[in-house]
Image (spheres, rainbow, N blue to C red):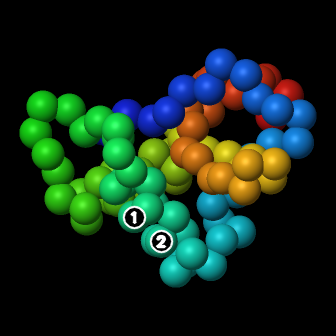
Amino acid sequence: MVRIAIFSHCHPTTMKIPYRQLDSGTLQNLLEEYATRDGTDYGEREASLEDKVTSLRRQLQSGEVVIWFEPGEESVNLVLARDLPIDD
């Protein structure tokens, strides 16, 4: 399992982006970029990029993880759905 960034607060202009609304190429690029970020932890053994992306995609499909866009910072992150405010 891929460990996802946890945010203790959410800015009012941030928004959850449904992964199904993204073009498949855009989603693939997003997952690859996230999987190769410094500080991303994949446990005791290093996984291939393909394995990391597959794991992230599964977590998106299950609803465990969501895409979180922060317009003010022009950044996109993957966050655990359980860490988001309930009204999101």
Residue 4 lies, in percent from the top left, at 45, 35
Residue at 63% x, 53% y is 76
The three-letter amino acid code for the residue at tag 1 is Glu
Secondary structure of the residue carrying numbered label 1: helix
32 relative position to 47: left or right: right
Distance from Cα at disc 2 to Cα at disc 1: 5 Å
Q: Which residue is mark 1?
A: 32
Mark identifier at residue 10: none
Name the one closer to the observer, 20 or 76.
76
Which class describes the residues within 10 Å of circle 1: few (<14), some (14-19), or many (20+)?
A: some
Q: Is disc 2 in contact with disc 1, using a CB cutoff of under 8 Å? A: yes
Total numbered badges shown on the rendered structure: 2
Secondary structure of the residue carrying numbered label 2: helix
Residue 73 is at least partly visible in this image = yes
Tell me if residue 69 comes above or below residue 79 in the rendering. below
Tell me if residue 21 comes above or below residue 82 in the rendering. below
Residue at 43% x, 62% y is 33
Q: Which residue is mark 2?
A: 29
Q: Quadrant of residue 44?
A: top left
Q: Quadrant of residue 26?
A: bottom right
Q: Farthest residue in the right direction?
A: 12
Residue at 35% x, 38% y is 39
Residue 5 lies, in percent from the top left, at 50, 33
Q: Farthest residue in the top direction?
A: 8
Residue 67 is at least partly visible in this image = no
Name the one closer to the observer, 67 or 40.
40
Residue 40 lies, in percent from the top left, at 35, 40
Q: Quadrant of residue 27?
A: bottom right
The three-letter amino acid code for the residue at tag 2 is Asn
